[in-house]
Amino acid sequence: MNNIVLTNVFRFLGLLLFQGLILRRIEFDAGVWSYIHILVYPLFIFLLPLRTPRPLVIFSAFAMGILVDLFYYSPGIHASTATFLGFIRPQVLSWLEPRGGYNVNFSPTRARFGDNWFLRYSAILLAIHLFFYFSVEAFTFVFIGRILLNTLMSFVLSFFFIFGYMRVFDPLD
Amino acid sequence: MRDLLLLFLRFGGVLLFIILEAFSFILIVQFNQEQRAIFDNSWVNFTATADEKLDYIFKFATLGEVNDSLAAVNARLYEEVFLYRQAMEHLEEDTLRPYYLDSLLMDTVYQLIPAKIIRNSISEHHNYLILDKGSDDGVTANMGVVLDNGIVGVTSSVGRRHALVMSILHRQARPSASIKGTNYFGSLRWEEKNTRELLLENVPKHAYPSKGDTIVSSGYSLIFPKDIPIGTIQSIDSSDGGSDTYKILVKLFADLASLDRVYVVKKSTQKEQVELVQQAQNE
C-alpha cells in the first residue's frame, strides 16, 4: 500500500521535473505555422492505480497540470488539460476492459496488461490529452486544422518518449 | 450527513472536475495574453449581440414615446402648412399688394395639439370620441379635430385632462366643405349608414361638380383650417329636378373607425372672429 503511494509520489515528482526542466527546452518549430510539444507528464495520470478514488485522480491530475504550468508560464492551460484527462480516464478504461474485468489492485501498466493493451490505452489518452491541450492553447476552433496537425506531430514524439519510458523502467505498479 | 457523503462519493468526481476546470479557465483567461484577447473578443461579441437582441425587444416598449414625439413634430409641420396655404391664398388674391409673410403670420395662426384617442364610437347615431388632452393642454370647447387627410369632429365639452369630441359621424354635425379649387360650398351630413360616406348638401347646381372631385374643408366654419382634404365625390344625385342644389355622396379619405392619433386645431384669432360674428348678429 505505502509502496504504491510512494511510487506514485516519486513518479509525480520525477515526471514533473523531467517535463519542466528538460523537455520544456526541446520545443521546436516544425514549419512556419506549427510546433511540437513533447508531453510526457500525462504518463503519471495513465499509471495511477485502478483503485484510486475518482476525485483523487482528478485532483492529482490537476495538481500535476498546474505545476507543469508553472514551468511553462501558461497558468491554467496544462491544468485544465490534465484535469480533463483525469476525468475521462475511467471512461477510457471501461472501453478497454478485458473480458474478465480489472483486478482493482493493479495499476494500468504494460507489465500487468501486456504490450498491446497498454499501447491502445496510452495512445487514446495521449491523443485526447494533446488535442485538448492544443484546443485550449488556441482557445478557438477557428484553427482546427492547425490544432489537429500539432496534435498529430506532437503525438508521434510524445508517444515515442512514453513508450521508451515504459520499456526502460517497465514498472509493475 | 452520511447521505451527503455518499452523494459526494457518487458525484464528487464530476463536481470536482467542474470546479477545477472552471478554476483553470479563470487562470487561462486571467494570465495568458493570447487567450485573454480571444476571450475578451468573444465576450464582447456575445454581449453586443445580446444587447442588440434586447434593444430590439425593448424598442417596442418605447415605441409609444417615439410616436408621441413624432406626433408633436407632425403638428408643427401642419401648422406651417396651414400658414403657407393662407399665404398662398392672399398672394393669389392680389399679387400687386405687398404682402409679407410676416404680416400674414400675424393674421391667423393655427396651433395643433397632438392627441390620442381613448374611446371612439361609430355604431350609434350620436357618435363621440374622447381624447387624452384637456384644458390643461390648451384644449377648449368648439375646436376642430383633424387628421392630415380628413376632419374628425369638434370638441364639445372639455375636462382638465380629457376632451369629448362630437364626431362628424353625428346626426347634428354639419361641418362645411367645399369643392377644391372653387369657393362653392355645402354642409356635410352623416346618413347614419356607412362610416366612410358623408352627404354634401346644398351645393349649387352651377358649381358643376363632377365625379372624382376632391372635397376639402371650406374654412368658413371658424373651426377647421381651410383646404384639409376630406374625400372625393363618389356620386351626384340630380334626381330632384325642382331643387337648385345637388346632393353629393362623398367618399372619405380617412377611416374614422380606426383612428389613433389626431390633432386639435387651436386658432389664435378664433375668439376675435367669433366675437365679430356675434356682433354682426346682434346689430
Image (spheres, coloured by chain):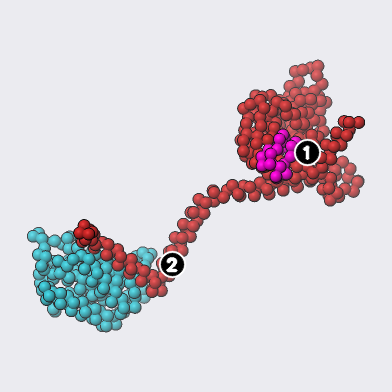
Chain colours: A cyan, B red
Give the residue at x 81% y 24%: B205
Q: Position of residue A146 (x, y in %)?
A: 34, 68
N-terminal-most mark, 2 or 1: 2
Image x and y of residue A169, in percent:
13, 78
Q: Which residue is mark 2?
A: B40
Q: Is residue B149 magenta?
A: yes
Q: Are marks 2 and 1 in contact (CB under 8 Å)?
A: no
Residue A170 position within the rendered picture, expressed as x and y whole percent measured from the top left: 12, 76
The answer to which of A116 and B39 lies nearer the viewer is B39
- Quadrant the N terminus of chain A occupies: bottom left
Q: Secondary structure at mark 1?
A: loop
Q: Is residue B149 visible?
A: no
The C terminus of chain A appears in which quarter of the rendering?
A: bottom left
Name, please, the residue furthest toward the left.
A100
Which stretch appears magenta?
Answer: B134-163
Name the residue beneath numbered marker 1. Answer: B226
